[in-house]
Amino acid sequence: MAQGNVATPFLDMRSFVREESEVSELETAKPALGSPFVSVYELEGMPEFFSPEEEAYATLAQELYDQEFDEALFELMVAARGLHEEHFVANAQSVDGERALTQHFNQLIREAEAAVGSFEREFGARDVGALREGELEAFAESYAPATPVSPEFEEFLGKLVKKVAKGVKSVAKKAGKLAVKLGLGPILNKIKALVKPLLDKVLQTAIGRLPAAVRPAAQQLADRLTGRKTQPADASSTASTQATAADAAADAAPEDAATAVQEPADAGATELQQEFDQQLANLFVAADEVDMELEVARVRNDARVSAPPVFADLDQARERFIDQLHELREGEDPGPVVQNFLPAVLPALRLGVKLAGRARVVNFLSGFLSKMIAKLVDPATAPALSKAIVDAGLKLLTLEVTAQDEARAGVSAIAATVEETVRRVSNLPDYVLDNQELLEGFALEAFEQAAAANLPPVLSEAVYRERPDLLESRGARAAWVMLPLRRRKRYKKCGRTFKVRISPYMADEVESFEGPLADYLQDQLGVEDATEVEAELELFETLPGATLADIARSEAEAAGATGTPGTPAQGAAQLHPLTPKAAGLLLGEPRLGRHMPWRTHRRRIGVGQRFYRLSIPGRRMLTWPAPNGKAYVRRPGGLRVWLDVSKNEVRISVFLSEVKAQRLAVRLRRASHAGTIAASFQKYIERRLGPIVRGDRVNGQVQIIQAGLAASGDTLGAALRRLPADATAAFAARIQESLVSAFAEFAKSQAQRFIAAAEDTADGVTLTFTIAQPPGLEQLGKALLPNGQASGLADAIRAGAAPQARVDVAPGYARG
C-alpha cells in the first residue's frame, strides 16, 4: 500500500506516523499483565518420554475430566450470574450483589466439604487396593446432601462426589505405579481444602472478576512432567507468572485475523475443571504430607490473588463513553474521550494483552478512531444518526424508549463501532501490528467493517453502489442495538424479527452446535420429520462477558415469560450460531452471519459472535420429568470420543435423543432390515465423527488420554488440526467402519437390549462402543505431542483389518 491518502467514504485520512511520533515512542517492554487462561498446554522443554510415574500422573489428571462436571460448574455460574444481576439491578451497587452471592454460596461450600467428609469417613481407613468393584460408584450414586439445597447445588454435589470416586478408582487401578503411601484418609482430608478455592473461582468468573496472576492448570502439568517443584506463589513469582502469560498471549496468533469474533477473556467451566483435576492428581500422588501441604498452600495463595471486575468495569466505561460522546459540543475533539475508553476495552479481550504491550498501536488507534468518528458525533449531525437508529429498530425492541434513549441511540452505535474496531485490530497478527503502513490499512478496513455492522445506512446510495461492502445487508435494513440502554446487558439485538419458512432440506444443511438444525426441530421441538415449518428468528450479538444463558434469561424476563421449563442454561438451547451459511439459507443475507470458530460451544462462546433464537408459534421445548420431580428440557443427541492411548483403546459414546431412540425402537420391534437401520446410523455418525477427529469441534466432544497432552479444550483442538488431513480422514473412516459394523450386528442380534433401554423413563439412550487396539492409535497419540512426527501416520491407520467393537447400551445420558 502506498503511504499517504487512504480512500474511505468516512474520512480523508492521512498517515498518523508523524502525529503519533509526537505523542510517544514505541515501548518495547511488555507490562506485567496477563490472563490465567492462556492455552499453554504444549510447552517447550517437555520430555519426549515419561517415566511410569510421570505417565501415570498425567493420565490420572486426564481421566478425571468429566463433561457432566463441566455442565454442573456451568449451571453454578449461570445461577450465580442471575443472582448477582438481580441484586445489582435492585440495589444499583455491585458490592451488594457480591455480598448476597457469597452468602448464598456459603451453604454450598459447607455442603461440598461435608460431602468429601462423608467420603473420607467411609473410605479413609480402607486399603485403596482392596476396594470392591462398584463400591465407590454405589456410594457416589446414593449420596444425598444432609439439608435441602437448590437444584444446581444438588447437581454439583452429586458430580463432585462422583469425581472424587473416579479419582480413587483410577488410583486403585494404578496402585502399582502410584503408591498412595499415606492412605486415602489424609488425601481426602486435603481435598476438602480445595473445595472453597474452586467455588470461589466459580463465583469470581461468574461475575466477571478475572485474576491476572493465577498460573494456568496446563503450566502445572508441565511443571510436574519436567520436574519443576510447585511452590506457593510469592510476589516475585506472581510478577514472573504475569509476564509469562503476557508473553504467551502476545505470541498466540489467532486463527482468523481481523474478524469480529474473538475468544472470551474469562475462564470457562472446562478450564476450571482441568485446574481442579490437576490439583486432585497432585494430592493423589503426593510423596508425603509436606507435598500435600504445599499443594493446598499454593491453591489457597492463588485464590487470594486480586481479581478486578473486568466486565463490570467495561460496562461502566462504555456508559461513560456514551455519555461523554453525547455531551460533546460542536467542534470539540473526541480524542480524550476515546483515549480514556480504550484501557477499559483491552482487559475484556483475550488478545487485548497484545495491544496493551504495544503503546504505539494503542495511541495510533486513539487518534485514528477520534478522526473517524469526529463528524458522526458532531451535534449538528448526531440527531440524524439517532433518528436512523430509532427508525431501524430501537422502538421495535422495547416499549420503554425515553427521549434520552432516542438521543443517545446514535452515540451508542458509535461506541459499539469503536469497541468492535478495537476488537478486530487486537485480532490482527503481529506482522501487521508491527508495521505502521500495514496497520493503517488494516485498521481502516476494521473500522469500515465495524461501521457496516453497527451503523444504519448514513451514506449516499452512490457510495453504497460503489462500495457495497459498507453495508452488511440491503434487504434487512435493521440496526444492532445495545438494550436496554440504562441496564447492563452484554449483548446487542437486531431491531428486526424475521419470519422465515424452513424446508427440511434447509434445516438439514444449517449446522448448530450438536448437529444440523433439523435435529433441534425434531428432538427438542417435536417437529415431525420432513415437515416444512414457519418460524420466527430473533438475532443477537455478544459483547464481552456474555453467555447464551444470559441472553436466554434476559429475553425471558423482557418478555415476561412464565412457566418456562428448565434453567437459563437449558433455555440457551433455543439459540444457534448465525454463521454466514445459516444467514444465507434462512435469511437470504449471508453477511449478517459471523463465522463460528472451532473453539465455540454452548458453554463457551466468542465475543462478537452472532446467534439466532428460533421459535415456532404454538410449540414449546419438549421436557422430561427427572427423578427429582423437576421438568428439564430434553437433551439433544450427540457424539463423544475418547482416544485412550495409554490403553490403546477408543471409546465412542453415541447419545440418541428420546425422539430418535423411540424411532429406532419402533424399527427394531418391527424387525426392520439391519442393513437399512445401519445405513441411517452411519449417516448420523459420519456427520459428527469427522469434524471431531479433525479438531473442528472438540470442546467436551473429544478426550485424549496421552501423557504430555491436554485432556480436552483449545490446545487439543489445535493439535488435532495440525495432523495431516489424510491421516484424520483415514482414522475417522476406520473408526466409522468399526462402529457401523458393530451396530448392524447389535441391531440384528441384541435388539431387545436397546428396546428395553428405550422403554425406561430416562431421557434418550446411550450406546457406548469400545474398540481395542485400533490401527494407528499409538502413532496418532505420539504425533499429537509437541514436535511429534506424523510421517507415515495415514498408512499406519489404514493397515490391517478394522477391529471389532464391543457395544453397551444404557437408558438416559451415560458416561462413556
Image (spheres, helix red, strand yellow):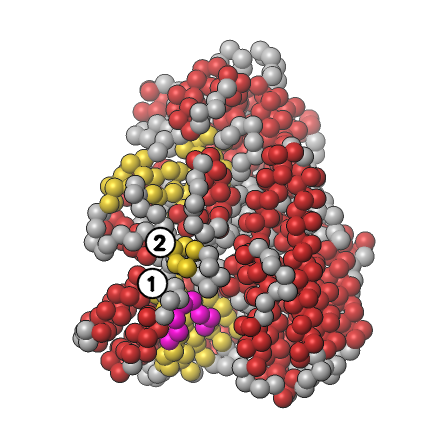
Task: Inspect this view and state whether residue 308 appears.
Answer: yes
Looking at numbered disc 1 in the image, what kind of residue is underneath it? Glu
Relative vertical location of residue 574 with respect to residue 514 in this rendering, above or below: above
Disc 2 target residue: 622
Relative vertical location of residue 393 with respect to residue 300 in this rendering, above or below: above
Name the residue nearer the viewer: 593 or 777. 593
Q: Main secondary structure of the magenta part?
A: loop
Residue located 24% across and 45% down the image = 533
x, y percent for residue 23: 69, 27
From the viewer's perspective, tell me whether residue 797 is left or right of residue 132. Answer: left
Disc 1 target residue: 658
- Membership of 359 in magenta stretch: no
x, y percent for residue 340: 66, 29
Please report whichever mark, 2 or 1, sits nearer to the chain's N-terminal start.
2
From the viewer's perspective, tell me whether residue 429 is left or right of residue 800. Answer: right
- Membership of 812 in magenta stretch: yes
Residue located 70% across and 44% down the image = 99
Circles 2 and 1: CB distance less than 8 Å? yes
Residue located 36% across and 50% down the image = 621
- Report how far apart the C-alphas of labels 2 and 1 lie in the structure: 10 Å
Residue located 65% across and 74% down the image = 119
Q: Which stretch is magenta?
A: 809-816
Name the residue nearer the viewer: 588 or 170. 170
